[in-house]
Image (cartoon, helix red, strand yellow):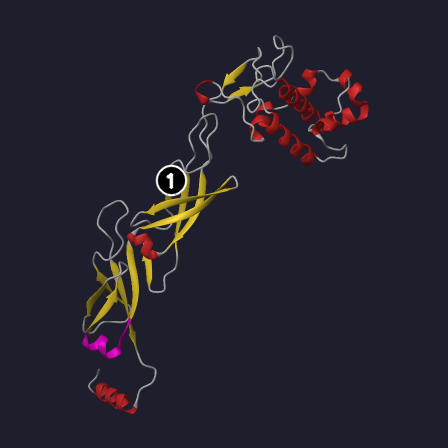
Amino acid sequence: MSTDYYKTLGVGKDASGDDIKKAYRKLAVKFHPDKNPGNKEAEEKFKKMSEAYAVLSDQEKRKQYDNYGADGFSQHYSQEDIFRGFDINEILRGFGAGGAAGAGGRRRSYSFQSGPSGGDPFADLFGGGGQYRQMPPQKGQDLEYNLAITIEESVLGAEKKIAINKDGKVDEINIRIPAGINAGKKLRLTGKGLPGGYGGPLGDLYLNISILPHPIFARDGNDIYIDKEVKFSQAVLGTSIDIPTVGGSVKRIKIPPGTQNNTKIRMKGYGVPNFKGSDPGDQYVKVTVNVPKKLTAVQADLMKKLAEEDL
């Protein structure tokens, strides 16, 4: 009795390759032997639909099938011809059905075997005399995630929650940002990647760290920089000013008399904790002297007097 491969998969003769693949996917999940142990009817349906897919998914075989018809095709193609070049493992894994599990929960890898099994490529899958080889565990695929953090978070550390899309499912992960981490660093989260194959371990998740711009602070390595404007008279006579730190505190520093424009004043130890545990960086105050563009009459007279004193 001839077999109508199109009817077996439930598609029309004008079906596209994607339509054929989708139809087989649906049937493979439903009739896979792992889900129907001991069910001979499901076994036969799985074999027939896999044979249909092996033919219709191959352009040349499908062309010959369409030209010769079912009867003519069976005279030209043996079972071995039909399944030659057909990756059973890809079908079993790729459509979510999975191969049958071997010892220790590992997946079995199937290959076409002629001889004792009578040329049946599914003999080992359904407990026959075919051969299979045990595949070694394979680590799951690693994932990467770009994470932008604030300067404060990079200095002080932080607890954050991120959402990762894994094969269509959103996985929320709590992470700890270590104090002192810098832009360009990668954080590795072991076992937060995709599942492994054949009983292998999960892949890892790598966080690519970048630091967001800040309205006050700038970071260079382990040092923090802040700009501070002082009046001309303060630069000349000296003064004390309050400076915020990236850690959240405020520290009063002295502006020495005669401070020049663009002078940098070092605040030792108020920078970034060293990521490797050694001494922290420093915070630097870049002093900008504000020279007024306009003077009042009184200020102008005073400046003339100062000029007369060669100041």
Toward which corner of the image does residue 207 lie, by quadrant?
Answer: top left
The foreground one among 182 and 144 is: 144
Q: Which residue is mark 1?
A: 189
User: As displayed, is residue 126 above or below residue 227?
Assistant: above
Residue appearing at x 67%, y 32% in the figure: 23
For the question of whether residue 19 can be seen, the reply is: yes
User: Would you say residue 144 sits in the magenta stretch?
Assistant: no
Q: Quadrant of the N terminus?
A: top right
Task: Tell me the kind of residue under disc 1.
Answer: Leu
Residue appearing at x 40%, y 35% in the figure: 191
Determine the secondary structure under disc 1.
strand
* Left or right, 58 with reference to 238: right
Toward which corner of the image does residue 143 lie, by quadrant?
Answer: top left
* Left or right, 96 with reference to 270: right
Q: Main secondary structure of the magenta part?
A: helix
The magenta region covers 229-238
Image position, residue 280 (x, y; %): 23, 52
